[in-house]
Amino acid sequence: MSKVTFLDFLKDRIQLVEDRMQSHSHGYNPELELALDHILSSGGKRIRPTIALLIGDMLGGTPEDLIILGASVELLHTATLVHDDLIDGALLRRGNSTLNANWSSAATVLAGDYYFSRSAALGADLGDPAILRIFADTLSTIVSGEITQLFERQHICDRESYLKRIFAKTASLFKMAAKTAAMLSPVDEEVVEYATSYGYELGMAFQIVDDILDFTGEQVTVGKPVASDLRQGIITLPAIIYQELHPDDDSIETVINKVAEEAQIISLIGKIHDSEAIELAHREANQFAGRAINALEKLPEGKERQALRKLAEFVVARES
Amino acid sequence: MSKVTFLDFLKDRIQLVEDRMQSHSHGYNPELELALDHILSSGGKRIRPTIALLIGDMLGGTPEDLIILGASVELLHTATLVHDDLIDGALLRRGNSTLNANWSSAATVLAGDYYFSRSAALGADLGDPAILRIFADTLSTIVSGEITQLFERQHICDRESYLKRIFAKTASLFKMAAKTAAMLSPVDEEVVEYATSYGYELGMAFQIVDDILDFTGEQVTVGKPVASDLRQGIITLPAIIYQELHPDDDSIETVINKVAEEAQIISLIGKIHDSEAIELAHREANQFAGRAINALEKLPEGKERQALRKLAEFVVARES
């Protein structure tokens, strides 16, 4: 979100979130601190703490609580990324080397565990067991979603599984950030619900756009090979829609069963890219973003609500 | 602890702990449930929930809270074992196949993460953020201890590092089980401290005896090759004491630097086994167990205190 200026007013607070992530991870092991420095300096949108700060500020949460929450949420996200990159054997993330590119698998597994534990320690400092419970359940959702994907890969090509998968992968954590920020604020249950909806809908829109960019983005911008999911046998919305539009084209099945040659894969990517599927997938992302914006209508006016609205618009309009 | 009859009166409650571990892990992914069934049916001493139940019962904790605590503590332990077995490439634990023997590395990493998250969810249900904070810090201690060992292997042969390492590896979790059980009970701070000491000292004794058994136990009883630590370049108390007794024998250095041939390794194991080091290491374990028993003196009399005392005696006397 380097080109995003509507969030400039949050920059100092996001810096405080990063500082807290680092300071809270001190005192155990210097290698783990250096690794976290490397991860943080490798960039990242910090969209999850951004959501938490904007919602909490909008609803009158305590600034200190929101910094702790933002740091806890981002450390939980960081821990899952460290394990994901290890599992995928990814050597680069956003053009920077991943932890597993430099460390052994053993050390990388442990580093992820460490960031989970520091996330939980920060979460505990918020003093509300209900928030910790949401953190724990969200991590269960994320991880079991990945396990399901591992065990089911090469079979699934339907919309219901896809929506479940992107909820687990992305929207669950967006939802958690929004919901727990609202829970830390002096507002009633109904307001918490609207904030929660915003997080959920935004997360769904965000992941659909990521999946579209996997087909339309340049490798250099997205930071990974084009159609990397499809190449791994993972079907996302553009491919699902393409299949719906072209039920007789069996090339998706050939690709996900990994019996396709490179030329076939490139041909399929080109067909999806040039089909209506991209436009239709965008339309679905816009529907989620629209519902996120609708949920905001019920929340207090002000610069935070305006920024949350722009964030939803940006998430679907972005090109990387 | 199958030969241990003094804990028979706890059997039904340990069964409730296992049931809670399983029921609390339902509803996310059937493969993860099956994997937990396999892990639980593979045995294990359940010594950590045993400590929690005995201390909590002794101090008047609520039975339901203690079942939740026991399940949370054992799930945290289980999660660390799942990742440890993966890291070590261990295919057997207590003679049963490990998760990574049957699952891919990717799925095993995620399974450990899942059990962490279920442990945290149970911990959150106890309703006390201070307990969650201790859980999180204990996990940080365990994991950073392992990271330190990975980065320092082949260099360390001193008592201070050893004691730090066995605290991180074992005593931290024993201490946590004892402390949090006391915190859930209607007792004052001083009592919590004595209970905490018991857990710490017992855990230190337990790990020293494990390290002795690594030299003296039969492979079939211990469930892994004799002197498996030494073979991996990890120095434990018997080897440290042997080195202190024989400062001119450079064979330990040769072995931990992995330049030793099998005959040299076997010769060194034999020398340690037949030296006074084993007896002296036992004496140190007995000192820790003695301090655990001393801490009990300050705690309420009854069958739980008697069982905790017998547990400390058993931990140092056991042969597997």
Image: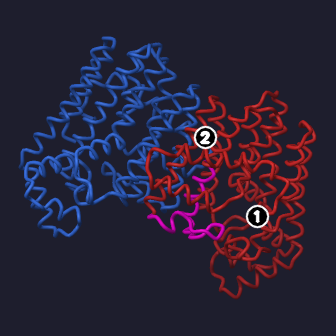
Chain colours: A blue, B red
Say which quarter of the image contains residue B107: bottom left
Check disc 1 and report the residue beneath it. B210
Q: Earlier in the sequence, mark 2 or mark 1?
A: 2
What's the magenta region? Answer: B76-104
Between B26 and A273, which is closer to the camera in this rendering? Answer: B26
Between B170 and A39, which is closer to the camera in this rendering? Answer: B170
Graded by Cα atoms within 10 Å as few (under 14), some (14 to 19) or many (20 or more), the crowding at tag 1 reads many
The amino acid type, in three-letter code, at marker 1 is: Asp
| Callout 2 secondary element | helix
Q: Residue at x 36, y 27 (%)?
A: A51
Chain of the residue displaying label 1: B
Chain of the residue displaying label 2: B
Check disc 2 and report the residue beneath it. B136
Q: CA distance from mark 2 to mark 1?
A: 25 Å
Between B50 and A94, which is closer to the camera in this rendering? Answer: B50
In percent of width and height, residue A245 lies at: 8, 48
Please give the label number shown on residue B186.
none
Answer whether labels 2 and 1 touch (C-beta < 8 Å).
no
Between A79 and B71, which is closer to the camera in this rendering? Answer: B71
